[in-house]
């Protein structure tokens, strides 16, 4: 629970870097994205503004986040895919070719492996739907539902990536501002006023991610609130507002986000992509740590408590289930260490900071819950 909570904490930095990148293009103020002090001040306004608005209650925040997701993320993604097909139909030049040589990696070097980091993060969190399996009329269909969702997500991810990679030269793509910049280039190419429309998209995207940020502040803190009520955290965290909002936990989380924002933002200097890559890799690494623990727990449960009732069975044969879990564990271990590979384009002098930052954040994520667990009897 703590690892998921702290993982979301670091992920908020990533989200805010994207928001600032979008706004810097929207208002034609690149200094917002390249000046560390300006970037940090704007991050604090976004973060603490989202924290303050949580007092209205989790349900209201959830409804607002749903609308902002549709307006700021779903609609822009669908529109860029449509614009991409129009671009192809008009016969414009392609900057990336789709063939056997370009689709399948033929050399597993650091630059190839590190490209999987954002792709891995995109599919983290699917386990959050697992508790709902008990509500299904036929729980055995759960795996089919998840497979369908995964394939749909992969399809949209591929189309969105192709829309960017095939329409804009590689040298012009930036991680933190790429999506909004692509809109302008792509829409101009198909005869639409991209310079105007991409500013609208920038505001929409920023609003969509702010909505997700608010949702992430509300969701995981509810889990930590339940843990606090069970005595796994100091009693002061077991209190909530009249709307059921664990505000003390949220403020604590926002303080942690502030600390990580200081470390990442000011260590990256004017290199906005470096800050984005570090926070992205740290988020992925910490989430993979969650999966490693979950897989170990599953293997132990299948081995020692196979007779326990379960709403869903991956496979009736315990040995097959354990074998699949062991394979997943090995893949996750490899993926975890891949995240420590500096992103392509990272300056040599920054690579040490990149790796050290990730190791430090992962170590802290492991040490803090052990300390909390050590004192749980005292708090109870």
Image: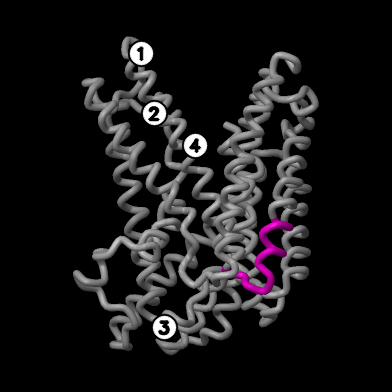
- Numbered badge on residue 169: 3
Please, what secondary structure does the residue beneath circle 2 have?
Answer: helix
Q: Position of residue 281 (x, y in %)?
A: 52, 55
Number of marks in the image?
A: 4
Q: Nearer the viewer, mark 1 or mark 3?
A: 1
Q: Position of residue 233 (x, y in %)?
A: 71, 25
Please, what secondary structure does the residue beneath circle 4 have?
Answer: helix
Q: Which residue is mark 1?
A: 304
**Mark 3 or mark 2, earlier in chain:** 2
Query: Outermost residue toward the left?
Result: 100
Please tell me whether residue 27 is drawn above or below residue 140 in the rendered image.
below
* CA gap, disc 4 and disc 3: 37 Å
Q: Which residue is mark 2?
A: 133
**Mark 4 or mark 2, earlier in chain:** 2
What residue is shown at x 63% (from left), y 52% (from top)?
A: 12
Region in magenta: 261-273
Q: Main secondary structure of the magenta part?
A: helix
The one of 266 and 141 positioned closer to us in this rendering = 266
* CA gap, disc 1 and disc 3: 55 Å
Q: Nearer the viewer, mark 3 or mark 2?
A: 3
* CA gap, disc 1 and disc 4: 21 Å
- Numbered badge on residue 290: 4
Near mark 3 (Cα within 10 A), the count class, few <14, some 14-19 or many ≥20, is few
What residue is shown at x 39% (from left), y 42% (from top)?
A: 332
| Quarter occupied by residue 297 | top left
Please tell me whether residue 305 is drawn above or below residue 327 in the rendered image.
above
Please, what secondary structure does the residue beneath circle 3 have?
Answer: loop
**Mark 1 or mark 3, earlier in chain:** 3
| Quarter occupied by residue 18 | bottom right
**Mark 4 or mark 3, earlier in chain:** 3
């Amino acid at each position: 629970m703590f690892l998921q909570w702290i993982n979301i904490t670091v992920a908020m930095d990533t989200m805010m870097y994207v928001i600032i990148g979008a706004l810097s293009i929207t208002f034609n103020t690149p200094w917002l994205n390249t000046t560390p002090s300006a970037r940090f001040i704007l991050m604090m306004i976004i973060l603490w503004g989202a924290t303050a608005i949580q007092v209205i209650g989790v349900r209201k925040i959830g409804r607002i986040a749903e609308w902002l997701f549709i307006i700021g993320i779903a609609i822009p993604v669908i529109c860029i895919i449509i614009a991409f097909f129009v671009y192809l139909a008009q016969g414009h030049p392609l900057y990336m070719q789709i063939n056997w040589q370009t689709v399948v990696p033929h050399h597993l070097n650091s630059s190839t492996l590190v490209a999987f980091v954002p792709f891995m993060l995109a599919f983290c969190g699917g386990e959050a739907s697992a508790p709902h399996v008990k509500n299904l009329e036929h729980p055995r269909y759960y795996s089919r539902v998840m497979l369908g969702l995964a394939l749909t997500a992969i399809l949209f991810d591929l189309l969105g990536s192709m829309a960017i990679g095939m329409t804009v030269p590689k040298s012009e793509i930036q991680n933190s501002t790429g999506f909004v910049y692509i809109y302008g280039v792509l829409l101009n190419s198909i005869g639409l006023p991209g310079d105007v429309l991409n500013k609208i998209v920038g505001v929409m995207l920023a609003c969509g991610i702010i909505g997700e940020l608010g949702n992430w502040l509300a969701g995981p803190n509810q889990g930590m609130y339940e843990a606090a009520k069970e005595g796994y955290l100091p009693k002061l965290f077991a209190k909530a507002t009249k709307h059921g909002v664990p505000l003390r936990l949220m403020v604590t989380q926002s303080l942690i986000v502030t600390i990580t924002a200081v470390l990442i933002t000011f260590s990256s200097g004017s290199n906005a992509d470096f800050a984005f890559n570090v926070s992205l890799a740290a988020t992925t690494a910490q989430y993979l740590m969650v999966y490693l623990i979950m897989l170990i727990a599953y293997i132990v449960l299948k081995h020692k408590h196979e007779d326990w009732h379960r709403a869903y069975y991956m496979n009736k044969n315990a040995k097959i289930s354990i074998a699949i879990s062991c394979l997943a564990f090995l893949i996750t271990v490899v993926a975890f260490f891949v995240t420590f590979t500096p992103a392509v384009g990272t300056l040599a002098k920054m690579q040490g900071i990149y790796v050290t930052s990730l190791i430090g954040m992962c170590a802290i994520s492991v040490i803090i819950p052990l300390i909390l667990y050590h004192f749980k009897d005292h708090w109870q």
